Image: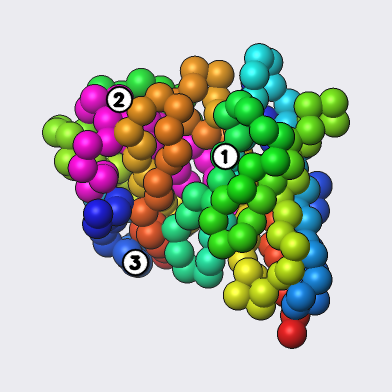
Amino acid sequence: DAGVIQSPRHEVTEMGQEVTLRCKPISGHDYLFWYRQTMMRGLELLIYFNNNVPIDDSGMPEDRFSAKMPNASFSTLKIQPSEPRDSAVYFCASKSRTYGSIYFGEGSWLTVV
Amino acid sequence: AQSVAQPEDQVNVAEGNPLTVKCTYSVSGNPYLFWYVQYPNRGLQFLLKYITGDNLVKGSYGFEAEFNKSQTSFHLKKPSALVSDSALYFCAVRDWAGYALNFGKGTSLLVTP
């Protein structure tokens, strides 16, 4: 099993630019999560999907953030326009059933300058 | 809201000694509790979980955790620490809907030779 695959692993971008983070969940998993990790706030749940449908996006910081899951094997998290305070590690994760364990990708390390 | 607390930012232990990383929880209903480990520049890896059954849960890499309902705790333990156990450890609890996980702020474990 290839695990959860995220790209890019590292990105440095200038303030105001659009950032798109990508995720491929584990095959057969029907829940997908986007988390953000910072030193100040720890791990925060941004949004999650079930069967490609967004279930809870209450953690999305503001309208600059959007997430989509066009099919069962792909999701994107977009920030437009990006700001320095968006600098963080963004994790995608997936799981296969309601009470199953969540499996994380290696993260996308975003720096906005 | 379902939440966990990790009271220690850092735990230091000598190699070969037993280690304990503390976690307390606050939930309504039955708690579903998890431990994850994060090595530097990596994603979170699942260690173990408590859903129901025995209060002592065994997990990966020789770790175990003890569920204590009266003390609302779920401490992570290992009888003999290794230098390679040095990492960031997260306790987590299932959210109210049963889909996502709410994480503690993490405890940094340092095992010295």
In x, y percent, where is residue A17?
28, 54
Q: Is residue B26 above or below residue A102?
A: above
- One can see residue A79 in this view: yes
Residue pointed to by mark 2: A50
Q: Residue at x 49, y 18 (%)?
A: B97
- Evaluate if marks 2 and 1 touch, with contact meaning CB atoms under 8 Å apart: no
Magenta region, main secondary structure: strand
Chain-order first, disc 3 or disc 2: 3
Determine the image quadrant of residue B53: top right
> Is A20 displayed left or right of B70 in the figure?
left
- Evaluate if marks 3 and 2 touch, with contact meaning CB atoms under 8 Å apart: no
Disc 1 marks a residue whose amino acid type is: Lys
Labels 3 and 2 within one chain: yes
User: In the image, which residues are magenta?
Assistant: A24-52
Disc 2 marks a residue whose amino acid type is: Asn
- Chain holding disc 1: B
Q: Nearer the viewer, mark 3 or mark 2?
A: 2
Residue B49's disc number: 1
Residue B71's disc number: none
Labels 3 and 1 within one chain: no
Q: Residue at x 43, y 40 (%)?
A: A102
